[in-house]
Amino acid sequence: MKKIILTTLTIITLISCQSDDRYEDKNRDPKNPTQVSSEFLFNSATKSLFDQMTSTNVNTNIYRMLGQHWTETTYVDEANYDFNTRNITQSHWSEIYRDVLSDLATAKINNDADLTLSADTRKTKNAQIEILTVYAWTQMVETFGDIPYSQALNAGKYVLPVYDDASTIYSDLLTRLTVAIPNLTDSGFGVADNIYGGNTANWKKFGNSLLLRMGVRVADVPALAAKSKSAIQAAVSGGVFTSNADNASLAYSNATPNTNPVWVDLVQSGRSDFVIANTLVDKMNALNDPRRPFYFDENLGTGVYEGGTYGRVSSFPSFSHVSARIIDPTNPASLMDYSEVCFYLADAAERSISGTPATAAGFYNAGITASFDYWGAPNVAAYLLTPNVNYATAPGTWKVKIGNQLWLAMYNRGYEAWTAWRTYDFPGFNLPDVSEDPVPTRYTYPISEQNLNKVNYAAASAAIGGDTQTTKVFWDKF
């Protein structure tokens, strides 16, 4: 008799729980949706990526110090390369994995499940997602070296993911990006796209420009030499940035929470934590660089620029500050710009991959000119004739010449300034005044990985030659 009663109750329960459109919506909490649109996830990931790469909050981003464009006034731990007091590497690792890569992966899943999308729109949306995904993965590999990749973003199956070889990841990312670019055929996310507003041509240029950057980055890696060459050639033939109008930028607004994070970190927070580093000011003063009043405030007097000693406590009133443009809440942020692309084209020409060494000077000049145009600085023609700037007479190898000017052009883009130094090994960086530690060549792995993912962390640490700040990532060959 009990079996009959239990069976009957089970059947009644199953019937009562069947989906009924009349009641299903009543069971949904509109303030806590279980399904999030791909547009929302795409934009959330986009803003998280731009914010993380742009912020100067020392808890999350110290790239401007690693690139020695800025130094600190009171708390100089970060300028002395202390990564662990504030657990900086953990913050960056978590932000990119959780708030960028995970959201982008979910956005793609939602696109694939959306039966209302046309085939072209679905492919284009997924290609836009893929370009940002490749950008984020590339940044992580270039920052840490070996990282969780094949088993990442799948906590249900891989609670403790293995670390994949960085060179292998990079090779796969080159393939993924090459495959994605031709799928950009319509407006994709359209007006919901906060980078290009659905402009397919600009997305293709962004994809190809990223492909060019990646190809140049690994050009000195023997195992990837052929793939590097084909990536560079495909990028150039496909069409890269041709002006600053093509820059991969995000426009910020006057209203929080959509203001530029530098404004949040310095103005809204009322902080006076940074001055310009002497590393940058001294080099620009020596070149009489016309960009100085656009990069820096003239708080010391018209035409007077002085940098704080890198890594030393520096009195805020005594040294040059950032310009008003840098702390404007609406100042756009860029993941990639035309100036940067021109210098990579100069690099490719010197290698005779795209163009010839004889054409490198033209790309080099175009890169400097693009930087001047972006900042509104005058007298670029005269600057290009300066003996220490002119491509024919500037000191050093072609790599040093390109690296120096790329580093100068990457002001306010700390990650690329640091990476320009790692890539081209030009001289002039200072040892920090207190620690005198060498300039880091990578981020160390987060402490959480050391504590929770011990076996895989240990294997990765051994594979890269030790989890230290001066271990070189696979593409940093010299």
Image (cartoon, grey):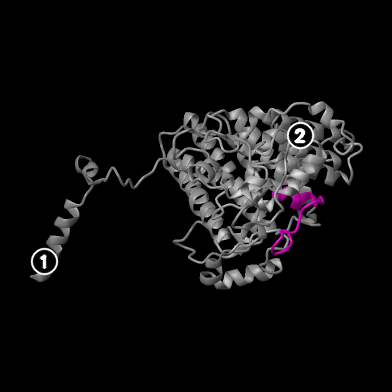
Magenta region, main secondary structure: loop
User: Residue 290 location, x and y as percent?
Assistant: 76, 32
Res 324 visible: yes
Q: Is residue 10 above or below residue 179?
A: below
Any mark on residue 338, and which?
A: none
Is residue 431 covered in magenta? yes
Secondary structure category for the residue under label 2: helix
Q: Position of residue 141 (x, y in %)?
A: 64, 55
**Can you tell which mark lies on residue 4?**
1
Name the residue rendered at 64%, 33% in the picture. Answer: 247
Magenta highlight range:
418-439
Quadrant occupied by the N terminus: bottom left
Q: Residues within 10 Å of mark 2 (few under 14, many from 20)?
A: many
Left or right position of 253 against 33:
right
Look at discs 2 and 1 and give the one toward the viewer: 2
As helix, strand or loop, the secondary structure at mark 1 comes to: helix
Q: Answer left or right for 12 relative to 310.
A: left
- At 72% across and 44% down in the image, what residue appears? 306
Residue 219 in sight from this viewpoint: no
Residue closest to the eye, 469 or 113: 469
What's the amino acid at mark 1? Ile
Tag shown at residue 367: 2
